[in-house]
Image (cartoon, rainbow, N blue to C red):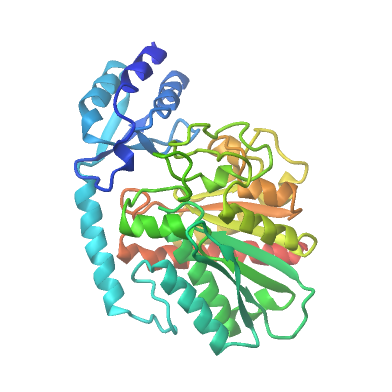
Amino acid sequence: MILKVCTLLLVFSAAALAGESYDGYKIYDINARNDFEKQLLLHLQNNADLDFFDLPRALNKPARVMVPPSMHVELEKILRQFHLQFELVNDDFGATLKRQQLENQSQRLIVPRDQSRGVSFTAFLRHAEINAYLDELARTYPSRVTVQVAGKSYEGRDLKTITITNGDGNANKNVIFLDAGIHAREWIAPAGALYVIQQLVENFVSNAALLKNYDWVILPVVNPDGYEYTHTNTRMWRKTRKPVTSSCYGTDGNRNFDYHWGEVGASTLSCADTYRGQSAFSEPETQIVRDLLLSLTGRGKFYLTLHSYGNYLLYPWGWTSELPSSWTDLDEVAKAGAAAIKSATGTAYTVGSSTNVLYAAAGGSDDYAFAVAKFPISITMELPAGGSGFDPTTAQIKPFVEETWLGIKAMAEKVIQKY
């Protein structure tokens, strides 16, 4: 019966999500109350027109899906047929995105400095603005900040890293490596990375202990081509932008790392959002992250990658439900971050291995950092949902990044204590 339902849904065009407009798109929350209903949702996820923003493993958490106008009636018919509980979250996502775009643009034109030199947390910045802020910090704090071009994206954009020290000249310290923005539409993740940078550099006195025995290396936007594309074309674009076929572009960077690549939770279909790539490390952007991670082997103690959304602190493995032998160390650090956030703001984060808490997905950067680059602590932080999920309002940016920093700082303190 499930197969019949999914076959029916697959007759619709798979091109809808490639369009630039989301006019008339609806967003639903669907509550799976048993294993059968969860399996139905997993099968529906295979339809290219249904963009599942969130499909958690737990039965007590609803799945969230974006649906094009051509499928509203049919999807609701199927959900009612199988008695699945659902709720309409947004009845015209396109109209919402247009309002948000205008608001973000107006906030960027105001350019509030937020008591910092060149970064604002009242608007989402473009990639060039992010790089300009890094360069400004390097000029202003030359003894403590170094900015380097780690490589170029497929479309030729500079992927810049910022290395933050306490200026004591010791080049052999342990390292915390943080990246963000591997998925293009997750705008709050680069914003979170920028806030970490601001706190470590411009609020150095308060955070000096985090830099006494550790350096921080931060890559705030892993996927600048996709990130820019979400600003100029298709807001919910997820992948990189290197062509795969004449009609399909991009690879899911977080399925492209060469550790159990392509084994589970990654699509072989080039148009799919979770497309694994033509080969492991087929994308210049993931090659850059790989090289950075490997260059830090031995010194690298904590790898943290920022994503959204879902209030999760996840650790290896993503390719299997089994746990690594040192999982208690990973769990201890992640729980320190969750506890700090919970204590300060009341926001609850779910902690656990990626496969057991969320879903199986091989080829992720966190598994690679842990298994191949030998970072003893490797964690994916999924920031809270804003707006309908991936689209926080400008008013939500600052409280989200401030809260995120509390968790990151607590995890860093735990790592520094342990290693």
Whole-percent x and y of residue 64? 36, 38
Residue 38 to residue 212: above or below: above
Whole-percent x and y of residue 94? 22, 48
Q: Which of the image's four quarters has the C terminus?
A: bottom right
Closer to us: 407 or 89 = 89
Closer to us: 306 or 230 = 230
Residue at the (68%, 76%) spot, across then down: 211
Q: Quadrant of residue 88?
A: top left
Q: How many labels does the image show?
A: 0
Whole-percent x and y of residue 337? 58, 58
Whole-percent x and y of residue 231? 34, 59
The reply, left or right, for residue 272 in relation to residue 408 is left
The reply, left or right, for residue 182 in relation to residue 7 is right
Q: In which quarter of the image is residue 117?
A: bottom left
Residue 280 to residue 48: above or below: below
Residue 74 to residue 141: above or below: above
Kindly tell me whether residue 202 is visible in this rendering: no
Closer to us: 291 or 55 = 291
Residue at the outermost front position: 246
Residue at the (31%, 48%) spot, across then down: 388
Residue 23 to residue 209: above or below: above
